[in-house]
Structure formats: C-alpha cells, structure tokens
Image (cartoon, grey):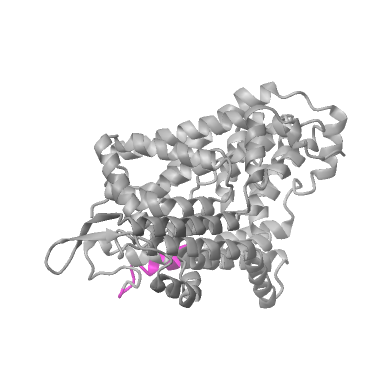
Amino acid sequence: MNTDLKHPSEMRGILAWIERSGNRLPDPVFIFFYCIAAVVIISVVLAAIGVSAIHPTQVDDLGNAVRINAESLLSAGNIRRLLVEMPETFAGFHPLGYVLVVMLGAGVAERTGLFASAMSGAVARAPRILLTPAVALIGMVGNLAADAAYVVLIPLAGVVFSAAGRHPIAGIAAAFAGVSGGFSANLLPGQLDALLFGITEAAAESILPSWDANIAGNAYFIIGMTFAFLPVIWFVTDKIIEPRLPPISAVNAENHTSQNIKEPGAPLLPEEVRGLKRAGLACLAIIFFWVSLCVIPGTPLIDEYANPEARLNPLFQSLVAGFFILFLISGWAYGSASGSVTSHRDVVRMMSESMSDLSYYLVLAFAAAHFVAMFNWSNLGLIFAIKGAAILQGSRLPDSLLLAFIILFGASINLFIGSASAKWALLAPVLVPMLMLLGLSPEMSTAAYRVGDGATNIITPLMPYFPLILVFCQRWQQDFGLGSLAATMLPYSLLLLLSGIFITVVWVIFGIPLGPGAPVEFTL
C-alpha cells in the first residue's frame, strides 16, 4: 500500500505558497521567544520616547484620569521581576490549571475506550440517509475526546460509508470537516473552552482585574455553531464533494473493508455496550449531583448574598471541576464494565499517561505565560488596545463588521500557525481589551476568534493531522495527493467560514447571550 506523502514541490499555486511559507516558520514555542525579544525591543523604544495613553476607567486619589506609560522591560525592576517571579509566572498562567484539571478526567475517559466506543456505536447505527449529518455531528461533539476523534472517527467514517455503498473518501472528508473544521462547535463546553478562556481571563484583567473566566461563556454560541455547521457539511458532502470523487475500485474497497471493519467498524462487543450503559448512568448521577448543589440548603454553588448578576458565578467557576469529575467517573464506570479498568491503579496510570501527553503543551505554556506576562508588564497591550479602540471608534464600523474582519484575520493566521492556544495567546492581549473598550464582552471576542480558528484548519498542510488524513485517503485511493485533499476540503472551509461569520453577525445584531451569564455587550 502506498502511503507516501506528496513532496511539497509537487504542489502548485496558493497551497504551495502556504506550505513553503509555513514550513519556514519556527516551532510555536520559539515563535513566543522571538515575540518576547520583539516586545523587549519595542518596550525600550516606546518607553524612551514617552508613549502613553489615558486609562478609560481608572482615576487617582484626586479624581484625575490615570495615564498609562510604556514601561521598558530592560528596567531593573522588570528584569528582577522576570527572574524572581519566573516560577510564579509559569504556575499562575490561567489556562494551565484549567487544562490540566480537565485532562486528568478526559485522559481516563479516552484510555478506557469510552470515547472510541461511543463514537463507533453512534456512527455504525446511523441510518444511511442520515449518515453524513451523523458523522459530522459526532465529529463536532467528538472534539471533547481530543485526539481520539481524529484517529478513531475519521478512518471509521470511511469504512462505514463504504459499507453503506457510498464513497469512503466522502466519509473521511465529512468526518474531517466535523472534527477539525467544526473544531470549536459542540454541544458541551470542554477542554478547549478551559484553555481559551484561561487566556481570555489573563487578557481581560488588564482592563478589569476582577473579571473571572467562565468556561461556559460560549456554551450557547458553540451549540448554535453546531447546528449552523451541520447542514453546511451535509450539503457540501452530498451535493459537491461525493458526486465529483472518482470511483474506488471494487477490489480495493472489498480488501480495505474486510481488513478494517473490525477496527473499529465491527459491532460493539457486549462488554462495550455494558460499559456505555454504566457510563451513561454515571453521567446522569454526576449531573444530578451538580444540580443538587444548586438547590440544597446552603446552595454551595449559588451565592445568595451576591448581586443578582453574580449569584451564579460559583456554578460557572465550578464547571472545570465538574467536567473533570464527569469524565473521570464515566470513564471509570465504562472501564470497570468493559474490563479496561481492573483496579484503581489502572485509573491512576491513565491519569498519569494523560499528563505525559501534555508535555509539549507544558513547554508551550511556559513560553506563552512569559510572553503574556511581559507584554502586560510593558503596558503595551493596554496602550495598543486604548489607541486601537479610539481609531475603531472613530471609524464608526458596526460591531458585526468589525468582528467579521477579526474572524477573517484569525482564519488567515490559522494557515500558518496550527495551535489554537498559541494564536490566541498572541492575539488576546490586544484584541480582548480593545473590544472591551468598544463595548464587546471578552466572551464575544473569544467566540469570534473560535470561528476563524476552525474554518481553515482543514485546508492547511501545516495542521498536525493533515498528513494523517491524507494517509487515510490513500488507503482507498493510492494516487490521492496533498493537493487532492486540500481541494476536497476547500468548499467546506469557505462555507464554514461564511456560515460562521453569519452566525456571529446574527448573535451581535440580536444581542443573544453567548452562554450563561455571558452577554455580547460589555460595560465598564
């Protein structure tokens, strides 16, 4: 079987330029280090020439507006701060704790086989007429399973499509569009929400130090994205992509199906079905427990003495712990029933392995934490946000149009930098405060970023799983190249981007809450 990837020189046009340009970029970790060096130089220059801005809300003891001055990062105080507070800067990076806690539970759910069995069972039982939307929906929801959605669902979709008499590459494309193009769409908040809102919180605190992240702050929006993206993927797959795919040879299809239907296309084993039932009961028990904490005497998760708009804050802030417990207990319940967990030691091992998978993220978080912290120390983010907000306010652009431009900007950057957290850590320190000054909430800026971040995942060869998806396609059609995959996914990308912009505009125009306690508008 030929699974060799096409050489970059075989690409032509814009895809070749994207691939060449992206391959020249350093690792995201070093991008942050280079950005730190650039911030240091800029801070020295701007501090020397006296760049400053008037803070829009802060006043001194005499009632005068506070002037924010650019601070040199090479000053004695900032050098001391960098070296003395380095452990605190790293450990205090908001996304770090959120992601580690959620992944402790998600790692158990993934390694026991819960995520894989749930996705396999759902796809295998989908009626033929609903096969495409079922694959797309499970792909979007499967993002809760992180890498499992890529390595389990996408090849499985090809097998299931072939078994149903449909083109297997159309199934792979639909699954890839759901998992990666709909990366931010979902029916539940998950680890991505924890990661992004941790970065948002760090950026928002430059304007409002008391602002706290709520990982359900985009819950309604991502549900809306799910139901907006679903018909798009369905239409593109059935009406645009599948009719134009060359037929698969009968011998290749028969051999591939017979070799792969058992992994993971075979019917679920009795112990797997039993595990799914127990996991479902465990999920219901955890949800009931969390609801009870909001209604029992004393209501631990409701602050009855706070202002009405802040009473639910403890509930929102508990959701990180909630998802950790939900994934942990449901994964353990599945594993004990299916046989993948024989004792508590297996659970501890799985939690440990999930932490080892985050080793690269820890290195990235170290670099990102210092970039964000030093950017804040220099006051450059706040000054740029104040001045940028004044320029945008003078331009009188409608909020919806402004957010559309931000979405397009994020989609463009996504062609070169694949990491969602890396891009948001670079953009958030300016975008979040700037939009807050323009009256848009941190949740709204995060939602707009998410739309742009997902749409172009599926057309850039720099996306980490892009070569793997190509290999899945080449198992069915040996001459299916990098350009073939990019061209296949391009209609998905364009229509997902347009539908994402449309839903963002609708959300802003009608002022629909983005999540519980998360309005579109923001008032200082």
Quadrant for the N terminus, please.
top right
Q: Nearer the viewer, residue 204 or 379?
A: 379
Residue 70 figure quarter: bottom left
Q: With respect to residue 193, does 398 lie above or below? A: above
Q: Is residue 294 magenta?
A: yes
Q: Position of residue 317 (x, y in %)?
A: 39, 65
Residue at 82% of width from left, 40% of height from top? 3
In the rendered image, residue 292 lying in the magenta stretch gets the answer yes
Please name whichever residue, 206 or 179, is drawn nearer the observer in this view of the structure: 206
Please give left or right for residue 355 compared with residue 473 in the image: left
For residue 304, which quarter of the picture? bottom left
Q: Is residue 411 left or right of residue 219?
A: right
Look at the image and tell me whether residue 506 can be seen: no
Image location of residue 394, percent across then percent down: 24, 38
- The residue located at (52%, 54%) in the rendering is 421
Residue 17: which quarter of the image?
top right
Q: Which residues are magenta?
A: 287-298
**Position of 164 compared to 49: left or right?**
right
Closer to the camera in the image, 110 or 450: 450
